[in-house]
Image (cartoon, grey):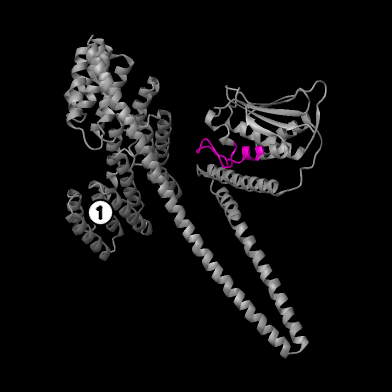
Amino acid sequence: MKNALLLLAILIASALPAAAQSAADGLDTTLVAYYRWCNRHKQDPEMLLKADTMFRLAGERQNPRMQSVALCLKTDYYYYTGNLDSLKVWVARTQQFTREHDQLTHYYFVWTRLITYYSKYSKYTLAQYELERFRDQAIRDDYKPAIAEAYKQLGHIYRTKSLYDTAIESYAKSIGMVERNNLKEVDASYLYLQLAELYTLQQKYDKAEEALRMSEKRILLPEHIWRTRISRANLAAMQGDFESAEEQVREIREKSGGYVSENKIEEIELTIYKGTRNFQKALEIVNKQLANYEMTKDSLGSSHYFYIPMLASRASLLYETGNYKAAAEDLSRQAALARQKYESDNQEMLNEFATLFDVERHDREKVEARQQAQAERLRRARLFETGLGVILLLATAFIVILTRLNRGLARAKRAAEESSRMKGVFIRNITHEINTPLNAIVGFAELASTTPDDEPERSSYIDIIRENSGYLQKLIDDVLYIADIESSEAPPSRAAVEVDTCCRRCIDELSKHTPLATEIRFASDGEGRSPRIRTSCLLLGKALTELLRNAVRFTDPKQGVGLSYSLSEDGRSITFAVEDAGPGVPEGEREHIFERFVKLDSFNQGLGLGLAVCRLIARTLGGDVRLDPDFTRAARFLLTIPTE
């Protein structure tokens, strides 16, 4: 709703620091003069010629930074003139140049232009897609300002979609990146202000107050105090403290010098008048804003984000004043516009998904084209090798005919030795290719462990390296485990297994290899002694271990994890239950989580193979594993296998 245009303004404002920084490159006054002219005439076609001249002069002066600025200016021209196709082309060209010349600031700046364009035209799906690629690339580059900026912009997108919890999480990650690395490129005060507004919308007023205090502590410019004051006034109005809110609004209107927009002030006044039941003044504000929106409708339809809810607001006010006919007319009009907007948004979303599909298909086609080219080169190489082999065989045969048997034997011996040598070279090379990444991980861990003790991040680096080495090893083990089970045609070896012993062994193994701070409770269902079943103890233990490991990762450590089992009434099957106290699984994801490499939380550590391995083992043993639909407190996994 109201966040849509706010998001656009935020995106445009956030892109300015990169250009401003480039303009400050005062090493050459001529280049700076070109920059200033182009920056003032961004929609003038002549700007393209001057930007080309600026690029050429900067190249002659061996100044890649100002060359990057020139390319950014050309990209800006297509952005401001609304030429999407040319914008995409110049974003790609600029990124290629800036990547080659290590100009990461401008590399990410032009990328934000494309993201801002999508947001400007309400293509939020495409904007989110580009932002996620932006974030992933920044993480690979370890370019922290861009990482913080990506999380901030993702927060704006989620806020526009009313995904407030996800938006809060993104803003918190951006704040964490800024605070840990003392980044000056991202305004921490503004990020805390966004958190405060979201907490206010969620009626979490204590958290909103704390976020506002943090925002005030990190204000960079004196005039920024007014944006926190307007948020405080809004918070007071939402809490019902209308007298304090009115006083703050008066102060803002008198002293801010126009820094705070009149629309923002009127929004708070509208909340005050509604709360104090001064419906006549509230109607005056609503009518004024509706008149402004009707005068400023544009081809983007952006006024709908304000106009539709404002109609509903006026209808409720008219109803309160007893003007039921006018209220009904506004409600009818609001419903019609909402339905029209809903249909338009659905069509726009379908178009965006179609665009994403075309992008993915284009990328896939490029990969397939490269693979086909490689296959063709390989085929030609094999033909050449085959022809060469035939020629060598014919030559060998001819020589064998013309020479004595002992020379033929000598050649055969040399060929065998050469074959043996090539085999050894192959084994050494493949061993090297496997050992190189593993040695790099281990070597880096050892290097980190030799860092002086006074380095504060030394231990965390070592833990991260070792932890990720473990994930790499577990990934290899799980993939090989799956491949081994799927490729094996022989049924698993079965023997008598004591259930209690197998369960306790799984708990002990998990505790031994993964130190647990979470208690695992085991409840036996046997009466006097443990039941015995005929199955594969190795496979059953692996399945139970994966279920327990998954439960421990997501449970509340204070409540722990429960493991139990029960025999069916006919005694032909046994069901193991692993219960945790975690956040649970959404209803639509209950089957999806058993697929390979699936994780509901992309920020959580893990490989996404544990539940897939568990289901494969269960079906190999003649059973299955599922999520208990009747268990609503958290999550309970049920592993059922036959007893014979």
Looking at the magenta stretch, what is its main secondary structure?
A: loop
Is 541 included in the stretch rendered in magenta?
no
Is 595 included in the stretch rendered in magenta?
yes
Q: Measured from the top left, where is residue 401 in percent x and y?
A: 73, 88
Q: Judge by depth and name the residue closer to the eye, 638 or 358.
A: 358
* 185 sits to left or right of 177: left
Query: What residue sits 72% from the left and 75% below the top?
Result: 416
Query: What residue sits 22% from the left and 11% below the top?
Result: 323
Rendering quarter of residue 537: top right
Q: Please determine whether, in this image, residue 104 is positioned above or below residue 605.
A: below
Point out the image quarter for the C terminus.
Answer: top right
Q: Secondary structure at mark 1?
A: helix
Query: What residue sits 23% from the left and 37% below the top?
Result: 299
Circle 1 residue:
74
The stretch of residues the image draws in magenta is: 594-615
Which amino acid is tagged 1? Lys
